[in-house]
Amino acid sequence: MSFIRAATTARSAAAAARRFSTEASAKKSSNYGLYLGGAGVAGLAGYLYLQSQQSAKPKRIQEKSPLDPDNWVDFKLKKVIPYNHNTSEFVFELPNNDASLLPISSCVIVKSSDPEALKDAKGKPVVRPYTPISPSDKEGELTFLVKKYDAGLASKHIHELKEGQTLSIKGPIPKWPWKMNEFEEVALIGGGSGITPLYQILNHALSDPSNKTKFKLIFANVTEDDILLKGEFDAFKKKYPNNFDVVYALDKPSPSWKGYSGYVNAELLKKEIAGPELKEKTKVFICGPPGQVAAIAGKKAGMKQGELGGILKELGYTEDQVYKF
């Protein structure tokens, strides 16, 4: 039965039903139920026809990322969403409604689209790494959460961009190759805007129904107003209570603060995160200001990991158990 014929049958049945309902009960047709049943069948047929037409549309398959790991590509700033007193979300438009397809975990590097607009004291272009907070399968958008630093040339430049202007981006730059359920316990230690790589892993893993890994985030900031993505982390804790927990630590807490106060130290880590005795079943990821990373896990050697040091080494963790973003 075609869709048009089904609809015609439905209208006829409905009209018949109205006609019979106005007659005396003694003259009601014994086929009344059949008419109503016919209307229901016709309506169902029409619904199924529409559904089949929608299902017949082939799903769009994206073959490659709009990002390029070997060449700089300019992307247009779509909108700016203020986050707090010194941080905003910068949403860049991806062409053809494509997704970034960034691997987890990875970052990109950015520079000014204008080669004369962003240079250091020696006249060289300033290039900085940033980790997007938008999911890798988010269509049409690439979003960065950027904190403006007084001495940060790149962050200042990004905050000065207007909607419609562009930023030059290259990537992805692969970091830790995340594999679902590779670890039983994962600790993530973040500081300030260094939270974005850790958020990238959490957002990806926790949203996967197959995830069994338990995550504990230790997030250090100066004040409560400096805590980035707090709403998202609190939502994770509520939605995934068996797989995620977060501890906020503040250097300068307000009198009403009920969380942890002070720097991240050995006592806090020993109490809150899985111990080194789990060996290959646990991993510690850390990202934050260089001083914090050095104190907790030892200095990075440029783009390389560097030797493990600091608090984590004192607590008995090995280099294989720690990764520094």
Image (cartoon, helix red, strand yellow):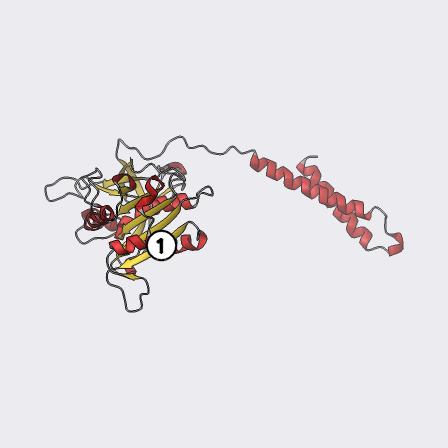
Point out the image quarter for the N terminus: top right
Residue positioned 32% across, 43% down in the render: 283
Point out the image quarter for the C terminus: top left
Q: Position of residue 319 (x, y in %)?
A: 25, 40
Helix, strand or loop at label 1? It is strand
Corner quadrant of residue 305 = top left
Corner quadrant of residue 250 = bottom left
Mark 1 — residue? 246
Q: Is residue 313 visible?
A: yes
Return the residue nearer the eye: 126 or 282: 282
Q: Mark 1 is on which residue type?
A: Val
Return the residue nearer the eye: 103 or 294: 294
Q: Position of residue 220 (x, y in %)?
A: 27, 55
Rendered view: 163 above or below 71: below
Circle 1 packing at 10 Å, graded few (<14), some (14-19), many (20+), is some
Q: Position of residue 204 (x, y in %)?
A: 39, 43
25 displayed left or right of 277: right
Residue lying at the far left of the rendered structure? 122
209 displayed left or right of 148: right
Q: Position of residue 156 (x, y in %)?
A: 21, 50
Q: Is residue 146 visible?
A: no
Return the residue nearer the eye: 61 or 23: 61
